[in-house]
Image (cartoon, rainbow, N blue to C red):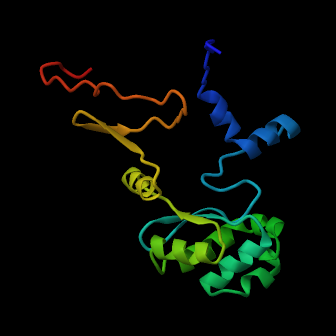
Amino acid sequence: TGEGQDLEFVVMRPLLEALTNQASAVTDGGVVATRNGNRHPSIAPYETVPTADGRVALAVGNDRQFAALCDVLGHPEWPTWPRFADNPSRVGNRDELHELLTGVLRTDGTGEWVHRLTSAGVPAGAVNDISAAFEMATALGLDPLVTTGSVSTARNPIRLSRTPVTYRTAPPGLNPATPSR
């Protein structure tokens, strides 16, 4: 059309949008969430759990997934226990459930658990440090880095089909004669 447009991207908006459950609790119910760490406020287990060599994030959103989790962990009896029989019961007993999960998951490494769990249809993923996150993004074909000159940086996450982001110059180098502030 030959006409341009303004593009506004306020970082606060996607951050608030990412708080889907907590935002709805405030806007629809007037309930302000308390600190839960990595736990979901109304689903259990939906949190990070330590393994032998790291942490695994579990996102077990229904009873079928919980049964599959318990099968993989070698405890098919857990879903039959009244305190874990359904999600409200698991939420009410999440501390005990977390301790049981930790006891089993600490017996093997994160990679092995993620493989076993995802193969069984249980949503799970490794909690990565930043280096491992770049490695994972690369393995997924996301091309997360761009090198300009001799400097590699994180690639701009926005992909534009008609006007792609360009990287014309490298970031400025450090000048050792200039003191840090």
For the view shown, which residue lies furthest in the right direction? 29
Q: In the rendered image of this protein, does residue 75 appear above or below residue 105? A: below
For the view shown, which residue lies furthest in the front direction? 1
For the view shown, which residue lies furthest in the top direction? 3
Tag count: 0
Residue 86 location (% of width, % of height): 82, 72
Residue placed most toward the observer, 66 or 140: 140
Left or right: 163, with 3 as reference point: left
At a point 60% along the width and 72% down the height, the residue shown is 118
Residue placed most toward the observer, 77 or 145: 145
Quadrant position of the N terminus in the picture? top right
The answer to which image quadrant residue 60 occupies is bottom right
At a point 65% along the width and 51% down the height, the residue shown is 36
Left or right: 170, with 132 as reference point: left
The answer to which image quadrant residue 152 occupies is top left
Q: In the rendered image of this protein, does residue 87 appear above or below residue 36? A: below
Quadrant position of the C terminus in the picture? top left
Residue 158 location (% of width, % of height): 53, 34
At a point 80% along the width and 84% down the height, the residue shown is 80
Residue 18 location (% of width, % of height): 67, 41
Left or right: 118, with 79 as reference point: left
Q: In the rendered image of this protein, does residue 42 appear above or below residue 77? A: above
Left or right: 73, with 92 as reference point: left
Q: In the rendered image of this protein, does residue 95 appear above or below residue 104? A: above
